[in-house]
Image (cartoon, grey):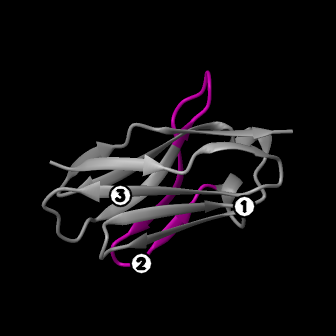
Amino acid sequence: QVQLVESGGGLVQAGGSLRLSCAASGTLFAINTMGWYRQAPGKQRELVAIATYGGTRNYADGVKGRFTISRDNTKDTVYLQMNSLKPEDTAVYYCHVNYRTMDYWGQGTQVTVSS
């Protein structure tokens, strides 16, 4: 069983920055993918960024050049550095882990960007 604990959300003005963290706990070895999704009110959950154990990084088009995903495999932790935030980035951000074919989700952390 994998448990995910997120931190780092909050309120920021447009143009500002936030850093999200997600730590996975449990008896883990080589987590396949770690990533972030978000869900805005009235919208479906969407992929923001994903990082594989092998080093591949993928981003949604709307965040490329502004967000950076990284992971520390020694700590089973994934980070999302968000710069140049826009009001349309406002959403609940969810950490996601795929481990041994199972999907796990964090509880979500609110990110609000004011204009």
Q: Name the residue under label 3.
A: 23
Quadrant in which the C terminus appears: top right
First in sequence: mark 1 vs mark 2: 2
Magenta region, residue range: 38-60
Residue 32 drawn above or below residue 98: below
Residue at 32%, 53% in the rendered image:
97
Q: What element carries label 1?
A: loop
Query: Residue 83 got which mark?
Result: 1
Query: What crowding class fits label 2: few (fewer than 14 Cα within 10 Å), some (14-19), or many (20 or more)?
Result: few
Q: Residue at x 75, y 52 (%)?
A: 85
Q: Which residue is drawn at 55% across and 51% down?
A: 8
Tell me the crowding category of disc 1: few under 14, some 14 to 19, or many 20 or more residues within 10 angstroms, Cα based: some
Residue type for callout 1: Asn
Residue 112 spot, x, y in % from top left: 69, 38
Using the rendered view, name the quadrant where residue 98 is placed: bottom left
Q: Residue 48 vs residue 82: left or right?
A: left
The location of residue 17, given as percent across then percent down, is 72, 58
Which one is in front, 101 or 2? Answer: 2
Front position among marks 1 and 2: 1
Disc 2 designates what residue?
55
How far apart marks 2 and 3 lie (CA) works out to 18 Å
Determine the residue located farthest toward the right in the rendered image.
115
Secondary element at image label 2:
loop
What secondary structure is found at the residue carrying circle 3? strand
Residue at the farthest top position: 42
Could you tell me how far apart the alpha carbons at marks 3 and 1 are, in whole angstroms?
A: 21 Å
**Residue 31 percent across, percent down from the top left:** 26, 65
